[in-house]
Amino acid sequence: MPFMPVKFNLQKRVKLAQGLWMIYWLSVIVGILLFSLGIFFKIELRKRSEMMDNNESHLVPNLLILVGLLACGVNAFGGKVCHDSLDPIKFAKWKPMLKPFLLLCCGFNALLLLTALLCFLMQFAVYLTLAEGLKNSIKFYKDTDTPGRCFMKRTLDLTQIEFRCCGNNNFRDWFEVQWISNRYLDMSNDLVKDRVLSNVEGKYLMDSVPFSCCNPGSPRPCIQHHLTNNSAHYDYDHRIEELNIWTRGCREALFSYFSSMMTSIGTCVLLVFLSVDMAGLKYLTTALETMEDPENPECESDGWLLEKGVKETFGDLLAKLKTLGKTNQVVEGGDAPEAAN
Amino acid sequence: MALMLIKFDMKKRVKLAQTVWFMYWFAVMAGVLVFSMGLFFKIELRKRSELMDNNESHFLPNLLILMGLVACGINAFGGKVCYDSLDPSKFVKWKPMLKCFLMVCVGFNALLLVTALLCFLMRIPLQFTLAEGLKNGMKYYKDTDTPGRCYMKRTLDLMQIEFRCCGNDNFRDWFEIQWVSNRYLDFSAKEVKDRIGSNVDGQYLMDGVPFSCCNPSSPRPCIQLQMTNNSAYYSYDHYTEELNVWKRGCRDSMLSYYGGLMNTIGLLVVLVTMLEVAVTIGLQYIDSSLSTLVNPEDPESESEGWILEKTVKETFTDIMDKMKSMGKGSKVDEGGEAAVATVS
């Protein structure tokens, strides 16, 4: 008993072929969309790779690019087959390739599912990479004269301005590192010497943040220095002041940006799932194979998804695998007695 | 002698109709592009209208939006006519409208050219509006508690960050106005009283700039306050320091941004005009070739197509004659009526 059989006449077959051709070309466009999403994601990761210690995994965008290209190719081929299916002469040359092609489509769908799953899961890896990378960025903020790190200050400033965040967890992270280079500190000054000596590691620490932490929405000009000293500024209480600098941490800001991007891409990939194409093509090929009178193109035919029921097909597959295994054993057994003799 | 006469047979006519149909659909997309450019320009003007004193002229973007919509309509209609021109029975119903439609097309093309010209010229009024608006913007920077101006600080800060500029002409503009609100000044402090007493207007002036003027590319943390005092900072010379704050003035930045935008839009409109002229000529050829069939009953007969039925001079004199005869016709009527009135 075939699985989900449908009766076809010439008109129905023509309609199916045309509809399927349209779906295949839409899928080519969707394949291009996936490809461009992959490229966009790769570019975004590259732009912020300094924040992630150049350590970020490019697995997901590379996979997306590959899947996009494959989708274009597979769907273009499917569309060509559909276009030729209406002409028996042209269809004859595609006939032998169709079974492997359908299996390839199956494999491709599995790859799509895997990509979508990775999109959702790799967010954890991104979070951990960001945490580590930002901590190091803040440490290297002052090293504008060290080759390889001289643009860290600029990158971190622009990131804090763009994502409206300050520090790793919050602005107090800046109180714990020296973010002014020694080149701009007057070491002969008493104040400077006091500060440097006041901590174990000899760092010039202060309760200030860089200018990129400033919130433009604040009604008063930005207070960046002596943040915890209420008497240093007129009418200022650091405990209730909320609009002065950004209160969000950059790890949270960057992570929410990347995670929303990856979630949307994963959802998009799921929507691209090509099962409709496969079912349609299967129906079309079976309908063309079972024509009662091969010479008359207008005769009726049957189409189905599976030749036998689901259970029987599964049982057949298992039996095939077993016979493959058994053939090997029999051959070995045959060889062994000959060798013994 | 017709202008640019071409002989047509059936095949050539069909090819012409198909090509012109294709070009019309291209022109519809060009119309959509012009519409969206107008919309984009309008949004950009609105975003920064606070910095232009809410005084900017929206004439140009409105015109672009209108032109885009009209272009879409005209080109869709033209495409439909081209599509039907291959079928004589369908073409018959469009025939009487074609001459008027072609006149409308010519007028529309002229209007498009005027729009392109305006795109290049409207830069000048924009320059004045920007200069005035930015000066006021800086004056109202501190008024974050005055209704109607409370977002000026934020707008100006975000603009200086985005366009990488500082002040109107340069950063010294900030030295000439008070940009710290009186709410945050301690009037009992001697230093504050000295500064206010030191100038005629009683303003708290300082040689400092807001944080949004800071250049993130500077190797040292930003120096915004006491900028002209070399001894306030270690190893600092304000004459040679270049990377500390943005050097460019915001009027220059904004003007070059909007100027570039308008130039691009103007160029695009010129290209669209050329496309429109091409499709108008194509439609004129289709119309004339279908009107001059040697044998009206046989669709496969030969015919001729042209841009103008007579030469340019003759067509011009014809139009002048028509206008004169229209004028004379009214005069004769008036003369006749006057004579009748006096006789009675």
Image (cartoon, coloured by chain):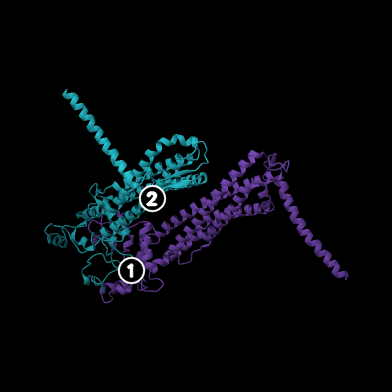
Residue B185 at what x, y percent from top left? 29, 73
Residue A239 at what x, y percent from top left? 23, 71
Circle 1 SS class: loop
**Which chain is mark 2 on?**
A
Q: Quadrant of the N terminus of chain B?
A: top right
Q: Nearer the viewer, residue A7 or B137?
A: A7
Q: Nearer the viewer, residue A43 or A50?
A: A43
- Horizontal side of A40 relative to B319 (left or right) equals left
Q: Quadrant of the C terminus of chain B?
A: bottom right
Residue depicted at x 29% and y 38%: A320
Residue that mark 2 sits on: A272
Q: Is residue B137 visible?
A: yes
Which picture quadrant has residue B3?
top right
Q: How would you rate the neighbour count of disc 2 (Cα within 10 Å): few for under 14, some for 14-19, many for 20 or more?
A: some
Residue A236 at what x, y percent from top left? 25, 72
- Horizontal side of B147 relative to A205 (left or right) equals right
**Which chain is mark 1 on?**
B
Q: How would you rate the neighbour count of disc 1 (Cα within 10 Å): few for under 14, some for 14-19, many for 20 or more?
A: some
Residue B198 at what x, y percent from top left? 32, 71
Residue that mark 1 sits on: B205
Q: Amino acid at mark 1?
A: Leu
Q: Colour of chain B?
A: purple
Toward the top, the furthest residue is A341
Q: Which chain is cyan?
A: A
- Horizontal side of B189 relative to B70 (left or right) equals left
Q: Amino acid at mark 2?
A: Val
Q: Is residue B218 visible?
A: no
Which picture quadrant has residue A263?
bottom left
Q: Tell me the number on the disc at residue A277.
A: none
Residue depicted at x 36% and y 41%: A104
